[in-house]
Structures are given as structure tokens and as C-alpha cells.
Image (cartoon, rainbow, N blue to C red):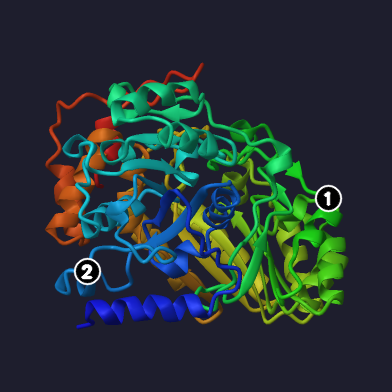
Amino acid sequence: MASARELRDAVRQRMSEEIGTLVEEAPEAVAFLYPSPYSVGMSSLGFQSLYRLVNQTPGRAAHRAFLPDDIEAFRSSRTPLFTYEGDRPVADYPVVALSVAYELEIAGLIQALELAGIPPLAEDRDERHPFILAGGPLTFSNPLPLAPYVDCVLMGEAEESLPAALDVLFGVHSKAEALVALRSIESAFLPSEGEDWMPPVAKADDALIPARSQILTPHTELRDMFLIEPERGCHRGCTYCVMRRSTNGGMRVISKERVLELVPAEARRVGLVGAATTDHPQIADIVEELVASGREVGLSSLRADRLNDRLVAALRSAGQTVLTTASDGASQRLRDTVQRRAREDVLVRAAELARAHGFKRLKLYMMLGLPDETDADVDELIAFSTELSKIVPLALGIAPFCAKRNTPLDGAPWAGIKVVDDRLKRLRKGVKGRVDVRATSARWAWVEYVLAQGGRAEGRAVMDAVHAGGRFRDWKRAFDELPADRPQRELVRPGNRLDRSQQQKRLRVV
């Protein structure tokens, strides 16, 4: 088992391979905590962008910390969780700012706080402990399961609210004073006030975007890739998506010139990241110019209806070998239901473009377990996938549908672990030998669903599951032991009061 010195040496070695690290000392230092391992946290565009923003503020510094890859090594060596830039315990900072991307990272938050020697529950902390400030993608849907563990949640985009919150926190003398002063920030949710009324999701001023990488590192899945958003948000209306137009008012486009100007000379690999990158009116121009400068380029969120000869040719010349897009519903009926513009002819065209431009395969992401889905929908997927595989080698990436708050499908029932697994078996059998099928776990998707549709009680149950060992059966037991007569969770946004009378029925395992 690694010693404390070896754990610190490993961090120093990792930092020595970074480009762009901001090692700053300042009177107002913040521990910037990501509740997943380094390779995940350093792939987060928001985490990196806000890290730079804080460090650019005179007199202020952000020092990163991550959930360790080897949690047991920290425990056995009695090494408190420490920051990268400061090489000091996270618990020594007056403020811990953390970013939570999705529900299951709440378990990582609990583990990280415990490794730091900080009581995870806000009610167990006092003036001796840091102020825990949370934000991140989870705040676009349902941050209530976070409520037991944090002192304040900044909803939505944090480019303006984070500096404002830090101004408050470094300008007061007590936590009680801070909680009163933070009420002045419109997007601040204060769990200690006891209400589940959600403030509006913040939208940053256009002058503060795009988000982009600060640090290049080889120790992520994207390995030394510089990430930048050519657009933010999405103007489409897919009913399952928290980034649909109702969340942030639509898509904001960054000009081609601005995107290219912000790519550093040392970045040889560039990732264009966003909810709808291919809807950018100049996306082909951006890719072509990056390729012409000798760079590899990757794109997220390729929309099948936006693919054409020029863009696909640019992606192939950018080093891409797999053309990845999504259809989301197993059948045309389901795609129409969730307002996904991915007709069969559009997907056939994507397969033909992949073949014509020499891609090794086409990969389609989709969901199983959508409301009203039947075996007939899966059979349609089998037949259609078989036809696509005759055009180009095909891979399917399957995720069980998980209804999220602040979407039109909020409250949609969970299909059931057995139902999802049975339909996945049906799909695998139907395309065996012709299509590669890879799927995420239906069990863990159910855990995500319970938290996505849950509230404070479900959030507290996460700690029980973590302390019991963190296996699926531990999560199931923790949720099963919640009192049946507990107050029904109600997340209320301005003008959006929702009925939760059927919550118990929706959260059951079937």
C-alpha cells in the first residue's frame, strides 16, 4: 500500500506532465474539489474554465483536489485529502468549491469530504469547517439530493455567480452571516433554509463564454486534448434532455474567429464540445481550419440531420475513424415521441457518408426503456440496425432511459431493471454477429433514476449506501429502508409547481 510520501510524489509527477497549470498563492485560496478521479475531473470543461476564472481574480487562487484513484491508500496511510497546487489539506481552506456532474457523484463527494476530515453532513459542521459551495451540471435538473451535504448550491452557469459568491464568503466573519448575504445572489439555493423552492438557473453573460481548457494533461481519456465550446446550450426540444431550449433559452453561438483565436499554439488535439456542436453555422469551417493547421479534431453531439459530405470529410481528415451520432429511440414512433429529429432516411444517409469517407464504423447512441416502449419497438431497431450494418459496420451504445427533472419527461416511470435487461437480451440476440452492442448497467441506471427523481431523503440514503460498501445491493437497501410516509419530494422552480403524489410508485424497483 502506498505511503503518504508516495501519494504526494504521484501527484507531483502528474502535475509535472501538465501544461497550463496555474500554481498561485493568494490570501483568498479556494479548494476546487471534483468528486471523481483526476482523469474525469480534468475532462470537465466547466471545472477547468472556472479554475482559470478564479485564478485570474486578483488576490484569489483555486487549488484543485480530486477523489483519489485509490481511496484505500489514503485511508490506510492516514493521508488527508490534499490539493494539487497548494499541497495542503482540503480541510484547511475556508471554502471548498465543488462541481457535480451527475447524481452518482454524490457518493464521491461523501468519500472526498471524509478523506479530508470534513463531516459530510452540513448539519454536523460548524465554524471550524470549510464552507461547502456546490455547482455543476447537476444543478440544471435536480440538486436536492445534494442538499444534506452542502451549504449553498449555485444553480446553472457559474461564470458570474461563483465570483459573486466568493466575494461574499471572503467578506464575512461567520457562516451564519454568509448564508444571509448569499441570498442576494439570485441563483443561490440555500438548503439550510429548509425549503425546496428552486431559484432560477443562471445564464452567464455572453462575454464570459466560451468555456475552454486551461490545462492539457495526458492523464485523461481525451489525452492532451484542448476542449472548447463553439456554442452553448441547445435550441432543439428533445423532451428527455435538461439542456433543451427550455433550460437556457436556446443556443448561443461563438464566432469561428473567436474559437480559433482561443486555441493555444501548443494544442495539437482539439475537442469541440457542446450540446449541439453540429448546429453551429460555421462548424465545417472551424474543423477545416483546425485540420489545415495540423491538428486532430474531435466533436461531441453530432446530429445526424446535420451531417453532410463536407463536414464528414472534414471529420475524417481530422483523424476521426468512427462516426458517432444518436437516434435515442428504438423506433421511429419513439423518436417522434421524444422529438428527436433522426428519421430513418437521415440515419441511412449517415451510414452512407461513413462508408463513403472511409470510417471504420458508425456508432449510434440510443435509449431503451422510454415510456410506452414495447418489444415491437426493439424488433424495429433490430431490423433497422441489420440494414444499416449492410452499409457500414455498426455499433450501438445503449443507455437505459432515466427521467430527469426540469424536462417534459420529468416523472416518467422507470421501465424496470428486468424489463430493460430483457429488451437488451432481445436486441443482442436479434443482431448477433452483425452489430456490436454495448450497454450501461440497468441497475446503476435505476440508482441514478431514484436520485434524479428524489430529494433530501434519497440524498441522505447515499451516505448509508457508501458506508455499507457502495455495492448495488447497498444502494437498494438504503433506498428500500427510507420511510414510506416521508414527505414527498417537490422541486419547485418559479412558475413550475409539480405534482409528486405518485412518487413512491415511480421509485420502486420492478
Q: Residues within 10 Å of mark 1 (few under 14, many from 20)?
A: some
Q: Is residue 503 left or right of residue 273?
A: left
Label 2, on which residue?
79
Q: Above or below — where is 366 with respect to 388? A: above
Relative image position of residue 299 (x, y in whole percent): 69, 64
Quarter holding the N terminus is: bottom left
Marks 1 and 2, how far apart at CA: 47 Å
Q: Is residue 349 above or below residue 475?
A: below
Label 2 Cα neighbours within 10 Å, binned few <14 / some 14-19 / many ≥20: some
For the point 41% across and 66% down, the residue is 84
Q: Residue at x 22, y 35 (%)?
A: 457
Given residues 37 and 283, the one toward you in this image is 37
- Measured from the top left, where is residue 27 in percent x and y? 45, 48
Name the mark nearer the viewer: 1 or 2. 2
The amino acid type of the residue labelled 1 equals Ser
Q: Which residue is mark 1?
A: 255
Camera-side residue: 9 or 345? 9
- Is residue 222 shown above or below 232? below
**Three-letter code for the amino acid on which mark 2 is drawn:** Thr
The location of residue 94, given as percent across then percent down, is 34, 45
